[in-house]
Image: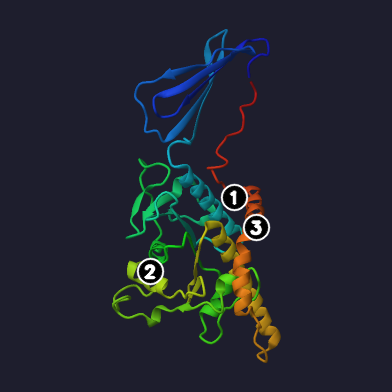
Amino acid sequence: MLPAARPRVLLIFLDFGHGEGYRSGTNGGAACRTERIRRSGAGSGRRLRVFLVYYDMHCANILLLLSLSALSAGAVPASVLGAATDLLDASHMLHFLGVVDAFGHVSVRSPANASEFLLSAAVAPAQATAADIVTYDIANATARQVTLNASAAIPAGFAERFIHSEIYKRFPDAHAVVHAHTPAVLPFANQPTIALVAQMHTAPALGPGAPVFDTRALPPAVLPPDAPHDLLVRTAALGAALAGAFRADSRVVLMRGHGMALRAGTLRQAVFDAYYVAEDAAVQLQAALLGMGHAAPIGLDAREVADASDTVPTLVGRAWALWAAQVDGAALYVNDLRRHAPPAPTGF
């Protein structure tokens, strides 16, 4: 720590990756000039580097050099940066809400290119960060690049990315997909007689009943005898079969022994729907137990489902704001697209 009587200089250099930057300084509290400078060896234009250098003017020793990295606002389209920010929040929220655990994933169709989607690398949803977001081609689920850093090596992706690519391919109006292994829905996926239906006004995505995708019913051309029969959707053919299981009146497909897949018109609604589908399953199971087999749970009728479907988009914002505040307050979740700034230096 510098003695209080010694004058100091703080130099701040911002490198925007295009060979241009800004340099400024203070000397003992007096403002110095700020100038635009030009550097040789321009970078890729994808990173913003900030260098803070403190000098002791009496001995000219550099006391601290702190290099920070943050995303350059001009590196990717603003719409993609916004989608990536929400995608990290969505991954964290789904874990916080108990919809996913170490497994499961959520994606969003690229707002800049409808033939691409954004999905994290194969990491636990709670631990996803900006460096994990990858842009995929909908046509074949091939990774194109790390979304926010095209020069970075592409990390390993989810084996079940075909769930996302094939749903986007089949449904042009789908802009977000969730795949989860939520235990609450499995009783309805694992028995053939009782459908999971909308029991509450916040779960109209289920419609009159969610269909069940059962890999045992697939022909050998889709699931060959010598292919893994581990219930994972690891090929385009399996993904297409799953996408084909959706019905027009339900945006949810249950997956026997596995979980569920869900499509939505927006990413934020996909999170909302996934949470309330899980809640709906718990309500229906409890209602069935109360009926003791004598009376089936009532559920919503067709008119109620239709009208609730119109109302839900007006509710999503309130839920998203609450869940964003909750994950922001938990140390486990780090959305470094919103919270990349380090604490201010102290002790100088």
Query: Residue 25 lies in what quarter of the image?
Result: top right
Residue, x 41% and y 29% (percent of image)? Answer: 17
Q: Residues within 10 Å of mark 2 (few under 14, many from 20)?
A: many
Q: Is residue 25 visible?
A: yes
Q: Residues within 10 Å of mark 1 (few under 14, many from 20)?
A: few
Q: Which mark is residue 239?
A: 2
From the viewer's perspective, is residue 141 above or below residue 130?
Answer: below
Residue, x 67% and y 10% (percent of image)? Answer: 5
What residue is shown with label 3?
A: 319
Q: Residues within 10 Å of mark 3 (few under 14, many from 20)?
A: few
Element marked by disc 3? helix
x then y, percent, for residue 103? 49, 62
x then y, percent, for residue 275? 60, 65
CA separation, marks 1 and 2? 32 Å
Total marks shown come to 3
| Disc nearest the viewer among 1 and 2 | 2
Describe residue 4's horizontal placement relative to residue 254 as left or right: right
CA separation, marks 1 and 3? 20 Å
Using the image as rendered, state which of residue 142 and residue 125 is in the foreground.
Answer: 142
Instruction: Inspect the image, locate mark 3, and give the three-letter code of the amino acid beneath it.
Output: Ala
x then y, percent, for residue 269? 56, 60
Instruction: Inspect the image, locate mark 2, and give the three-letter code of the amino acid beneath it.
Output: Gly
What residue is shown with label 1?
A: 332
Describe residue 33's horizontal placement relative to residue 246 as left or right: right
Using the image as rendered, state which of residue 225 and residue 323 is in the foreground.
Answer: 323
| Among numbered discs 2 and 3, the one appearing first in the sequence | 2
From the viewer's perspective, is residue 64 above or below residue 89?
Answer: above
Residue, x 53% and y 17% (percent of image)? Answer: 24
Element marked by disc 2? helix
From the viewer's perspective, is residue 44 above or below residue 124?
Answer: above
